Image (cartoon, rainbow, N blue to C red):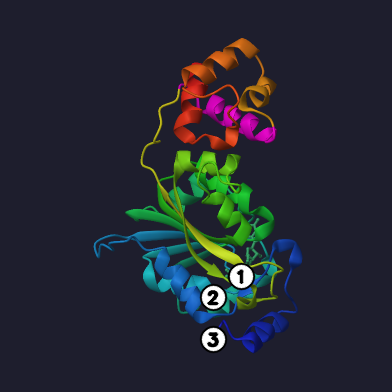
Amino acid sequence: MKLTDLSVIRSLLGEEGTSFKKKYGQNFLTNESVVERIAASALPDVPDPEEKLGILEIGPGIGVLTQKLSAVAYKVTAVEIDTTLLPILEKTLADCPNVHVVNNDIMKVDLPALIAEEFTDCTRLAVCANLPYYITTPILMALLESKLPFSSITVMVQKEVAERLCAPAGSDAYGAITAVLTYYGVPRRLFTVSAGNFVPAPKVDSAVVQIKLHKAPPVEVESEAKLFAVIKAAFGQRRKTLQNALSSLPGVSKEQIASAIAEAGFAPTVRGEALDLAAFAKIANLL
Ligand code: SAM
C-alpha cells in the first residue's frame, strides 16, 4: 500500500468515514522521495550502529512518514490528536512493531513523562514531523522549553516560518523566535517542498528545518526569564530603537537601559533586530 498515492489516501480515509480536517492542519505528503528525505534527515550525520535512536513524531496522519521513520529508527512514538485516524494507523503500521501511536494533543501531553515511558532503552532522541501549521511555533517552543535531551528536531513548516527560524541577525526575517531559538540550538534550513506535494495542497510552500540542539546554552545568563523578556520587548516594537522598546520592561529605568546598551558596546540608536543572542545576553545580564 503506497501511502503517498492519492487514491490510497482517499480510500483509507473513506473506509473510516473521515476526510481531511482543516482544523487539525491535515495536509498529507504525496511525494515518496520527500518523505524519504525527511526521514533520512532525522538520522545523525554519522550514524552509529550501536545507537538506539528513539524518534518522537508529532501528527503521523495516515502514517506515511511514520513508516519510513520506523525503518531507520530503533523506536518511534507518534502522537496524533485525530481519533478517526487511529484505525487507519493500525492498518498502515501493522508491519512496524517498533512504532507506538499515542492518541493525544501534543500540547496537552506531559512530555517528560511520555519520553521517560516511551524511550527508556534509547540512547539517542530526536523529533521528526510534518507539523500542523496552525500550531508550529507553540509546538516548537514546548519542545525546546522542555529541555528534554533531543539531539535534533527536524520539522516541516511553512516556508516563511522556516525563513524566520533560520534568519541571520539583522535580516528582515529575523525575529524574537529566531533569537530565542539560537539559545537552544542551531537552526538550518534543509530543503523546500512546494505546495503540490501535499493533499490537500496548502496555500503556501513549505520547507524542512533542522535544529541541532546545544548540550549547554551558548551564552551564560543570570536569568533565562530576563533574557527572553528582553528579546520579546526588543521585537515587541520593531520600529523603535532598542532603548525605547526596552522601556516596556517592568522595573528598569530609562537610565539603566541606556547605560546597559552603551556598556554592551552599542550606539543609543541601535535597533533590536541588529542584535544576536550574545548581545541580548550581555544586555540582559547588565540590566
Ligand atoms: N505526517 C503526516 C504527513 O506528513 O502526511 C501528516 C502531517 S499533517 C501536516 C499534521 C498532522 O498533525 C495531522 O495528522 C493532524 O491530525 C496532526 N495534529 C494536528 N494537531 C495536533 C496536535 N495538537 N497534537 C497531535 N497531532 C496533531
Front-most of residues 17 and 36: 36
Say if 133 sits above or below 182 in the image.
Answer: below
Q: Left or right: 22 with respect to 169?
A: right
Q: Position of residue 13 (x, y in %)?
A: 69, 80
Front-most of residues 138 and 161: 161
Q: Which residue is drawn at 58% across and 16% down?
A: 258
Determine which residue is flagged by label 1.
61
Type of amino acid at the residue the image marks with label 1: Gly
Q: Is mark 1 on a helix, strand or loop?
A: loop
User: Would you call the spot at circle 1 few (<14 residues within 10 Å), some (14-19), or many (20 or more)?
Assistant: many
Name the quadrant where ligand 1 sits.
bottom right
Check the picture and name the quadrant holding the N terminus. bottom right
Q: Decide: marks 1, 2 in contact (CB < 8 A)?
A: yes
User: Would you call the spot at circle 3 few (<14 residues within 10 Å), some (14-19), or many (20 or more)?
Assistant: few
Q: Left or right: 178 with respect to 13?
A: left
Front-most of residues 276 and 85: 276
Q: What element carries label 2?
A: helix
Type of amino acid at the residue the image marks with label 3: Lys
Say if 128 sits above or below 170 in the image.
Answer: below
Type of amino acid at the residue the image marks with label 2: Val
Say if 106 sits above or below 72 in the image.
Answer: above
Check the picture and name the quadrant holding the C terminus. top right
Determine which residue is flagged by label 2.
64
What's the distance in space between the residues labelled 1 and 3, CA to CA? 14 Å
- Res 287 seen here: no
What's the distance in space between the residues labelled 3 and 2, CA to CA? 8 Å
Q: Decide: marks 3, 2 in contact (CB < 8 A)?
A: no
